[in-house]
Amino acid sequence: MQRDKFFKEIENLNHPNEKLIKTHCSYCGMQCGMNLRVNTQTNKIIGVEPRYDWPVTVGKMCPKGVTAYQQTNHKDRLLKPLIRDDASLKGTTKGFREASWDEAYDLIAKKFKELQTEYGKDSLSVFSGVSMTNEKCYLTGKFARVALATRYIDYNGRFCMSSAAGGFLRSFGVDRGSTLPWTDIHETDCLFIAGSNTAECHPTSMFRIWNVQERGGYIIVVDPRETPIARRADLHLDLQPGTDLALANGIVNQLIKMGYIDEEFINKHTNGFEETKELVKDFTPEYTSMLTGVAPEKIIRAAEIYGKAPNAVVMFARGVEQQHKGVDNVSAYTNMALVTGKIGRPKAGVATFTGQGNGQGGREHGQKSDLLPGYRKITNPKHVEEVCSVWGITPEEMPQPGVSAYEMIELMEKKTIRGLYLLCSNPAVSAPNLNFVRKAFKTLDFMVCSDFYLSESAEFADVVLPAVTWSEDEGTVTNIEGRIIKINKAQEPVGESKPDWQIQVELAERLGKGKYFSYLKTARDVADEFRLATKGGYADYYGATWDKIDKQDGVFWPCKNENDEGTPHMFLDKKFYHPDGKAKICALPYRPPAEEPCEKYPLRLTTGRVVYHYLSGNQTRRIPFLHDMCPEPFVEIHPETASKYNMEHEERVRLFTRRGEAIYKVKITEAIRKDTVFVPYHFGHEDSINLLTIAALDPISRMPEFKACAAQLEKVELKKVQ
Ligand SMILES: Nc1nc2c(c(=O)[nH]1)N[C@H]1C(S)=C(S)[C@@H](COP(=O)(O)OP(=O)(O)OC[C@H]3O[C@@H](n4cnc5c(=O)[nH]c(N)nc54)[C@H](O)[C@@H]3O)O[C@H]1N2
Ligand SMILES: Nc1nc2c(c(=O)[nH]1)N[C@H]1C(S)=C(S)[C@@H](COP(=O)(O)OP(=O)(O)OC[C@H]3O[C@@H](n4cnc5c(=O)[nH]c(N)nc54)[C@H](O)[C@@H]3O)O[C@H]1N2
Ligand code: SF4
Ligand SMILES: [Mo]
């Protein structure tokens, strides 16, 4: 109560030249609460302060968050549309001229119509991202299906959350990234955290995580690297990249053998236990150790700690999910919670660390090739009918399901897809196997890119549209917990930039589809239609009005109507979302990574992040402080490996795989396995590690295996003339 009073006082501070706009960070799924400081004379954003009154992050922010405000009025902002005059300069920043919106829209409409007349409706594609609000994500799905009438739409969540989604759907029948609110997490007795560099990627979770230890609980970390969180964990399982499935099976086997299972829960609320018990029997500590490189005693100890804990939360992130068996990994770790019944009550459950700001909401409302708003399936006639009634089209007019993000790029290279509308993603840096991706983009007949800075992907575009940053528009985002929160507008768009929803409404008009869009005049209009379109779906947002979000500090979905307060804890009634109400314990045979080390490529390459940069780096590389802290990529190598290759700290060396090569500065560190090297992926052009990564896709989620491929190192002076 003291705290509330304090905040009332702060809110009432009467500063004549400044106002505070309550909002959330533009970057990761933590969505830390912040106030943007706005000068009331210039009406420009001038700074930021963390919000202590936000219950999830309680005044905490990371280096990206405290500098995020510098994006809005940055000198690199795109202020007007750009049109490429010289096609021979595709793939560079050159050959563009500024144009009016009218000219840009006319050109896009003309080219899109020409391509569809000549090659059919499905010759166009939409590739989007989830740094956008729910409303924008929703409208992007509608724009693809109604304005462009193409089946080809997919988004960057295929590189991020789709394995978690696939695993949760299979295990629980529903995909909400966390079964419990973050405000519960520090009160549990054991956190089992796999493939998450939490301290660098979700830093504002750390005070809760350390609190588990401070209260006498345990932290177990599974990671090939000794990350900051692994260093302080009670147990660090330093497995070889790509072997999580074996480890999870080994731990589940121990949980069963050591008697930590909850038979009543298993019998009443799950299917699949007997098959799983049979399958995991082979995963003895010794056999599991042989596959994973983790000592047998550590596997037994992990099962013992997790098994004994009265409450425990299994958590994972991209280390586990970005594998060509990511979905299996997710279900295999989820099995730990299901065999022990540590789910469906406060302080226990399963959670993935959602990556992008709207990584959760953005995957629920129709940007994925097979999904419609409210997590409806495009292959389910009833679902299609429900959405058609909101959109005003007939079920016959609804396009078929398309293909996943990387597969769309393959179709571009094959010329099946001829045109691309790319927004809110920078796949020329972040997609795997970049030499191929860049060739595919060059093959396109016509490409539009919407961004607020000229990204590496925009370099391939024929038209670049200036979008707004998160601070120049309003809408909702669904955070790491499944809590729907409100992003507020702090200043007017710079230059002639426009929000993506407005661009789509105006473009639809030019494409002759105005009647389906033109009544959407404000972000709130889009929000109202969006909520209606989710009504009755299992990701039901209908009751999550902006007023309720404000009053309740966010609303957890599902939230079906005005009187529904939302659902912070999933499965409290032990009802899962499969038709029989039971969860599925999955029997999952082990598969090695798609590409195993060999004589020519003896090392395992894994990739990921550093605290100072965000994703493709197009935003954070422009922020002076973040750039200074991490100006270029590096390759992490164990001292013994470095000495074997005769390499020194900070020396530049060549790293190569079957797909590509790059030169990196060596960072010698004992915090990595001897057989593994690590490179962060936030850098463009010749520095991109994705020139080297493999596009081996998970059979269910179609997620690429960013986390494991075979590689080799070479001293640069030894490089042969080619
Ligand atoms: N600073 C920063 N924070 C971010 C982001 C960012 O770009 N920068 N991006 C946001 C987004 S979109 C995402 S998706 C998240 C990602 O968050 P994380 O998944 O935590 O980040 P990564 O660095 O991709 O990978 C996590 C860890 O997986 C480990 N790993 C590698 N291979 C394996 C393996 O085979 N098994 C296991 N168990 N672990 C493995 C790596 O060593 C790494 O420490 O972060 C979000 N937060
Ligand atoms: N090797 C390797 N590759 C990876 C990963 C890895 O761990 N290793 N991780 C993968 C993961 S988890 C992810 S999430 C992807 C992300 O990869 P990308 O999708 O490329 O991520 P961003 O860099 O966020 O790209 C967003 C772009 O859109 C712009 N933008 C931001 N907000 C908006 C908006 O509202 N509207 C518009 N029009 N533009 C906007 C930004 O300036 C930026 O250029 O990368 C994947 N790639
Ligand atoms: S933890 Fe994520 S949401 Fe919070 S300030 Fe950092 S980047 Fe922003
Ligand atoms: Mo991500």
Image (tube, grey):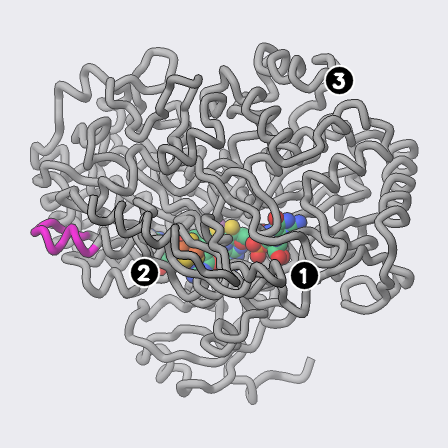
Residue 517 spot, x, y in % from top left:
74, 28
Residue under pointer 1: 453
Residue 708 in sight from this viewpoint = no
Q: Nearer the viewer, mark 3 or mark 1?
A: 1
Q: Report if the beta carbon of the residue with label 2 is closer than 8 angstroms to ligand 1.
A: no
Labels 3 and 1: the sequence-earlier one: 3
Labels 1 and 2: the sequence-earlier one: 2
Instruction: Point out which mark residue 397 bears.
Output: 3
Instruction: Point out which mark residue 211 bears.
Output: none
Residue under pointer 2: 199
Q: Quick one: SS at disc 1? A: loop
> Residue drawn at (73%, 51%), measured in percent from left and top?
449
Separation (CA) of disc 3 from disc 2:
47 Å
Q: Quick one: SS at disc 2? A: helix
- What segment is highlighted magenta in the picture? 210-219
Q: Quick one: SS at disc 3? A: helix
Labels 3 and 2: the sequence-earlier one: 2
Q: Quadrant of the C terminus?
A: bottom right
Residue 101 spot, x, y in % from top left:
84, 49
> What's the residue type where badge 1 is placed?
Tyr
Q: Quadrant of residue 114?
A: top right
Is residue 215 shown in magenta? yes
Above or below — where is 327 with respect to 345? below
Q: Residues within 10 Å of mark 1 (few under 14, many from 20)?
A: many
Relative side of 565 to 293, left or right: right
Is residue 286 shown in magenta? no
Relative side of 510 to 718, left or right: right
Q: Report how many numbered discs are placed on residues in the image.
A: 3
Q: Quadrant of the N terminus?
A: top left
Residue 295 spot, x, y in % from top left:
18, 57
